[in-house]
Image (cartoon, rainbow, N blue to C red):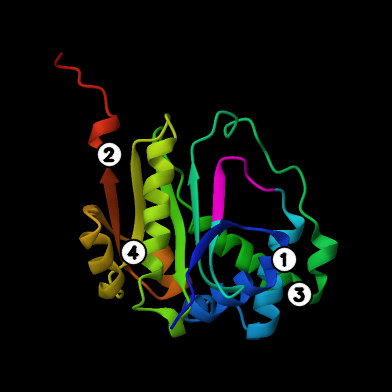
Amino acid sequence: MNSSITIEPMQAKYHSQVSRLLVHVFRGKFQHLTTLSDDDLALFFEKLFEHLPTNPSSRRMVALQDGEVIGTICVKWKGEYDNSRKQKWFPWNNFNRFGKWNLLKMLIGLHLFKHKPEVGECYIEDVVVHPNHQGKGVGKLLLQWAFHFVHTESTLDMLSLYVSAKNPRAKQLYERLLFQRHSQSNSIVWHLLFNEMKWDYMVLELEAKRPNLTK
């Protein structure tokens, strides 16, 4: 019998496991950005976790079973100081081993793939489940955490995410959880970087939290 799965905040002790999970699941996308090995790519993400300041308008959670990270989710929203908060430095010396060209391509690719949430929007940057644990409800648990998080935050009333048209299984899960397709993007940039052209932008609006302006 499987032990219970818990959802907990990201901690430094999980950096390595989460980094390897991101590479394991997204390797097909990253291979168009870099020739780094899986080990070096995992180390790259681990160093990002360690050396870059945490955005106060974001939250990463991990799904744990027997102390092992089997899934993760990251959400972000438009914070009070986002417009004035600037990254004044990047710890280049801590990333020298990856080579300047590999590092530059990865940073540009990750930057272009980011979405800027609107006021009230809680954007799901990634939701990842280890292949050995897919189909066991882990992704649903992580998304339910996000749903509960939005419910408890007075400034948020919508969940959103992008899903690749090449990933119908994930889209079906989102639709079962009442996400609806808001629009579809055909991005040449994303196609060149990640070899995926079509992306669905899906939203889940929490109508109960919106003011009734007809009263």
- From which residue to which does the magenta span run? 54-60
The mark lying in front, picked from 3 and 4, is 4
User: Which is more N-terminal, label 4 or label 1?
Assistant: 1
- Write down the residue under mark 4: 163
Residue holding disc 3: 99
Query: Which three-letter amino acid code belongs to the residue tagged 2?
Result: Leu
Residue 103 sits in which quadrant?
bottom right
Q: Is residue 99 left or right of residue 214?
A: right
Q: CA distance from mark 4 to mark 2?
A: 20 Å
Q: Earlier in the sequence, mark 2 or mark 3?
A: 3
- Element carrying mark 1: helix
Q: Which residue is mark 1?
A: 13
Q: CA distance from mark 2 to mark 3?
A: 45 Å
Q: What's under tag 4, amino acid-wise?
A: Val
Who's the residue at 34% across and 78% down the image? 135
Q: Please, what secondary structure does the residue beneath circle 2 have?
A: loop
Q: Residue furthest left?
A: 214
